[in-house]
Structures are given as structure tokens and as C-alpha cells.
Image (spheres, rainbow, N blue to C red):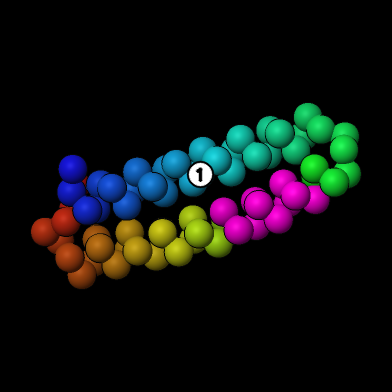
Amino acid sequence: MTVGSQVKTCYATLKSIEAGLDLLQASTTEQGLKTTIDETSRLIKIARQDIHQQIIHIDKQEPQYKS
């Protein structure tokens, strides 16, 4: 597996985690849990955005890593 494909797999995993957190938040009524999910979702979104920037960098600057 190339570096590029590993980074893209990580990105897809983060998107999946975000979707799972959205479903969990929609199904809970506990305010403390909703707050925790909100904060976790915010952190995951930041990480996903950072990974997306790395994908752009890899695709533009390092074509040998394209999958």
C-alpha cells in the first residue's frame, strides 16, 4: 500500500467516524453525552481537514505516491 493510499484510507476512516458520531448524537437524549460527541466531532473534523490538505499535497507535489 502506498503512502498516498494509506493517507486516503485514514481520511475515509475519519469520515466514517464522523458519520457514526452524527448517528450516535441523533439517538441520544443525554445532554452530557451530546456535549462530548460535539467536542469529539469538532476534533475529528479538524483532523479530517488536515488529512485532506495532506492528500492535496501528496497529489500535487509527490506524484510517485499517487494510488
Horizontal side, residue 48 vs residue 26: left or right: left
In percent of the image, x 88 and y 44: which residue is there?
A: 31
Instruction: Name the outermost residue toward the left.
Output: 64
Residue 30 place in picture, x, y as percent = 87, 38
Residue 42 place in picture, x, y as percent = 65, 57
For label 1, count other residues whose C-alpha is less than 10 Å away and answer few (under 14), some (14-19) or many (20+): some
Horizontal side, residue 58 vs residue 64: left or right: right
Q: Main secondary structure of the magenta part?
A: helix
The local secondary structure at tag 1 comes to: helix
Residue 36 place in picture, x, y as percent = 75, 49
- Residue range of the region highlighted in magenta in the rendering: 35-44
Q: How many marks?
A: 1
Residue 41 among magenta residues: yes
Q: Please identify the quarter of the rendering in which residue 26 is found.
A: top right
In percent of the image, x 65 and y 39: which residue is there?
A: 21
**Identity, as a three-letter code, of the amino acid under mark 1:** Lys
Q: Is residue 6 above or below residue 57?
A: above
Residue 54 place in picture, x, y as percent = 35, 64
In percent of the image, x 33 and y 48: which residue is there?
A: 8
Horizontal side, residue 16 vs residue 65: left or right: right
Location of mark 1 (residue): 15
Instruction: Name the outermost residue toward the top.
Output: 27
Q: Is residue 58 above or below residue 17?
A: below
Residue 5 among magenta residues: no
Q: Please identify the quarter of the rendering in which residue 29 is found.
A: top right
